[in-house]
């Protein structure tokens, strides 16, 4: 199968490596001629800037995993609304008729904040521009001519993304006051694994939640990490950014369910944050 991965970076690059290992012909689109996994054919283009993009012919499947340049409404519009529109136009111009496009979205489209369980049927009421732009993109793709599958990922962590680990290690993480703050995450390798799994399914659903098997209370995660690294437990209080009065991204407290993804046959490599962070730390998971 000829697969185009638009945004062949942190998640897209991991997906590309898996597909190449499977024997597929993979094209990796990215803005610069940066390093791609072995066997991936580079396509250099900036979907947020260029009016015309030259793509290979005969692309059978597409994964859109582009990330915005910055956390602004305009950057999100360019990455998630204009980018897919330009990509689909370029595919048509190249004579490609993909059987499916996978779109990497986010659980930011949900605004629930009281610890509610949410799934693919739950109401979407994003509190910020990021979620609104993603919903705009989802709607356009689902209403387009190419069959689309949306995957709403939780917080992505994995190799090279150790900000949370380092904040606990340095004693900067804080246990925020108030009620439970539920968080949802997924390891980078499970992002790639889930996308590969859905790409190869004959008839995937149009929407999945891409989160691991255990929504976890933030305090629990921070204290677990401290024990795993053998450092002091985080103190109560606000984090450095909040204490300095810096603007923060909207955050909810919700518990995302991955039952539909599991029912499709996907099995997690890192079912919870414990296995995922233990792998990053090179240690067995403590209780």
Image (cartoon, helix red, strand yellow):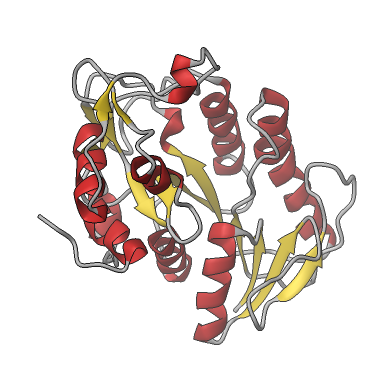
| Residue 207 in view here | no
Q: Quadrant of residue 110?
A: top left
Task: Relative to 268, say whether 145 is above or below.
Answer: above
Task: Report x, y in % for residue 159.
Answer: 46, 61
Q: Horizontally, is 283 left or right of 81 in the view?
A: left
Residue that lies at the very extreme toward the right in this rendered image? 51
- The residue shown at (14%, 58%) is 286
Task: Report x, y in % for residue 190.
Answer: 38, 62
Task: Report x, y in % for residue 144.
Answer: 63, 44
- The residue shown at (55%, 24%) is 132
Task: Report x, y in % for residue 16.
Answer: 58, 71
Q: Quadrant of the C terminus?
A: bottom left
- The residue shown at (60%, 28%) is 133
| Residue 260 in view here | yes
Task: Relative to 221, say whether 76 is above or below.
Answer: above
Residue that lies at the very extreme toward the left in this rendered image? 287
- The residue shown at (22%, 33%) is 219
Q: Quadrant of residue 282?
A: bottom left
């Amino acid at each position: 199968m000829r697969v185009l991965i638009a945004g062949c970076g942190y998640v897209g690059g991991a997906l590309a490596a898996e597909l190449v290992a499977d024997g597929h012909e993979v094209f990796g689109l990215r803005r610069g001629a940066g390093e791609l996994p072995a066997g991936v054919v580079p396509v250099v283009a900036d979907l947020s800037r260029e009016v015309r993009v030259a793509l290979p012919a005969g692309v059978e499947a597409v994964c859109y995993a582009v990330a915005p340049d910055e956390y602004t409404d305009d950057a999100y519009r360019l990455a998630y609304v204009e980018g897919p529109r330009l990509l689909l136009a370029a595919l048509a111009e190249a004579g490609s008729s993909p059987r499916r496009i996978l779109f990497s979205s986010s659980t930011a489209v949900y605004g629930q904040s009281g610890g509610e369980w949410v799934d693919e049927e739950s109401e979407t009421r994003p509190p910020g521009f990021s979620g609104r732009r993603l919903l705009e993109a989802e709607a356009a793709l689902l209403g387009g001519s190419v069959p689309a599958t949306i995957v709403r990922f939780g917080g992505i962590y994995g190799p090279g993304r150790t900000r949370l680990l380092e904040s606990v290690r340095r004693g900067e993480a804080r246990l925020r006051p108030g009620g439970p703050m539920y968080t949802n995450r997924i390891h980078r390798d499970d992002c790639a694994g889930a996308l590969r799994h859905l790409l190869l399914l004959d008839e995937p659903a149009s929407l999945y939640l891409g989160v691991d098997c255990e929504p976890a209370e933030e305090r629990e995660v921070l204290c677990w990490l401290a024990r795993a690294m053998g450092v002091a437990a985080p103190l109560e209080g606000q984090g450095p950014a909040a204490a300095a009065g810096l603007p923060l991204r909207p955050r909810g407290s919700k518990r995302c369910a991955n039952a539909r993804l599991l029912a499709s046959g996907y099995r997690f490599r890192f079912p919870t944050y414990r296995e995922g962070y233990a792998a990053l730390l090179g240690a067995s998971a403590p209780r």
